[in-house]
Image (cartoon, rainbow, N blue to C red):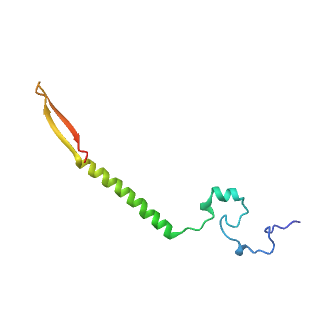
Amino acid sequence: MSSTKPSNENETPGERKPGLRSVQTTMLFRAVNPELFIKPNKPVMAFGLITISLCVAYLGYLHATAENKKDLYEAIDSEGARATLEFHNRK
């Protein structure tokens, strides 16, 4: 009868590392999927989160100030109809 044992007989189940770090993979697989093998770097994540948040806030600021720069004029043509004209300041 054959017994079912781990591939490495000297290794006990408690010593195995969880995840894909202990699995034999090729360098190409590791290069294409680095997030599976690299430990998270908290300072870099914090810097990225702050940077992206500031970029979104700046885009929101630009959008809000562009709305305030629009000048609206109401014109009446020769037939008496009103028309709203929009003029954009380019300062």
Q: Position of residue 42 (x, y in %)?
A: 51, 70
Q: Residue 54 occupies which quadrant of the picture?
A: bottom left
Q: Residue furthest front?
A: 91
Residue in the foreground of this view, choosing between 21 and 13: 21
Residue in the foreground of this view, choosing between 33 and 23: 33
Q: Position of residue 75 (x, y in %)?
A: 14, 33
Q: Position of residue 23 (x, y in %)?
A: 71, 64
Q: Residue at x 46, y 66 (%)?
A: 47
Image mark count: 0
Q: Residue at x 11, y 25 (%)?
A: 78
Judged left or right of residue 4, residue 71 is: left
Q: Residue 56 occupies which quadrant of the picture?
A: bottom left
Q: Position of residue 65 (x, y in %)?
A: 26, 51
Judged left or right of residue 58, residue 6 is: right
Q: Is residue 65 above or below residue 78?
A: below
Q: Is residue 43 above or below residue 90?
A: below
- Quarter holding the N terminus? bottom right
Judged left or right of residue 40, residue 63 is: left
